[in-house]
Image (cartoon, rainbow, N blue to C red):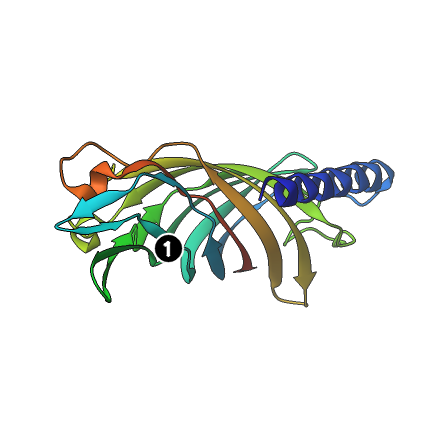
Amino acid sequence: MRSWLQHALAGVICLICIGLHAADTDTTVVQATKDLGLYVGSAYTLMDIDANSYTVGTKQGIPELNNSPGIFGGFCYNFYAGRSSIIRPAIEAVFLPATITYQTAMDYRTKQRIYPMTVEFPFSWIYSAYRVKAFPRPTARPEFGVSVRPVLTVKPLNDIQPVMRTYNLNTDVFAGFPFANSKSVMRMEVFFSYGWFNLIQSDNDYRTSSITRLMRHTAGVRLLFH
């Protein structure tokens, strides 16, 4: 995964260089504004786990992580700050039902859900000269951005085990492109989100004590409508 991440970051850096060069040569007059947006998307968990073996009765096993696809949706507000910056606070609901599997008897396995639903609050900075209400409308070019993303799990939906912290903090990198007609703008973005905290907590139950590290990262694509 590290090799994949290095290639992805190199691609984002290339897009940044292209965007910076294009913005320097753009002579379109841009009118600062702001707008409300709605977005939906799909994502996939890229969780990491370090675990030790456990014993239940006479059966020995080791936790198995099962990454999963999922969906999300939310609202955002674009604040156009200057000629080529967008500040975008947002709120979104994320459904990513990753699980950990435990084998507790011969041919018997149980699955525990990991953060099946979260409420997340990404706060993004985007390099883009594209404006929804500018006239004349600028030429569409690649955009890139970074986000700080506080994550809160919906605790009543979590399984009792393993015991995990109820919050996380992620950093996102993303790249996108705007598409427009006479009345609206759609943006398509691809992103990678890196979680910084070890989610696992302390507990004597084998479903928690057998896991020493559990990190939650995601990647996906979203469509934004303004």
Expressed as whole percent of the image width and height from the top left, the position of residue 31 reads 68, 44
Out of 119 and 43, give the one closest to the viewer.
Answer: 43
Along the line of sight, the residue nearer the viewer: 84 or 97: 97
| Closest to the observer, 210 or 146 | 210
Q: Classify 10 Å Cα crowding around label 1: few (below 14), some (14-19), many (20 and above).
A: many
- Residue at image x 57%, y 49%? 191
Q: Note whether residue 154 is visible.
A: yes
Give the labeled residue for mark 1. 94
| Amino acid type, mark 1 | Val
What residue lies at 44% left-to-right and 41% top-to-bottom?
122
Q: Residue furthest front?
A: 58
**Is residue 38 among what the camera can see?**
no
Residue 135 on image: x %, y %: 73, 53
Q: Residue at x 30, y 47 (%)?
A: 62
In the image, residue 70 sits, relative to residue 56, either above or below, namely below
Quadrant containing the N terminus in the rendered view? top right
Q: Position of residue 222 (x, y in %)?
A: 54, 58
Q: Residue at x 31, y 38 (%)?
A: 52
What kind of element bears circle 1? strand
Left or right of 55: which side holds 43? right
The quarter of the displayed image where residue 208 is located:
top left
In the rendered image, residue 22, in percent from the top left (x then y), is placed at 83, 42
Q: How many numbered marks, from 0 up? A: 1
Residue 110 left/right relative to 42: left
Of the pair 72 and 58, the residue shown nearer to us: 58
Q: Quadrant of the C terminus?
A: bottom right
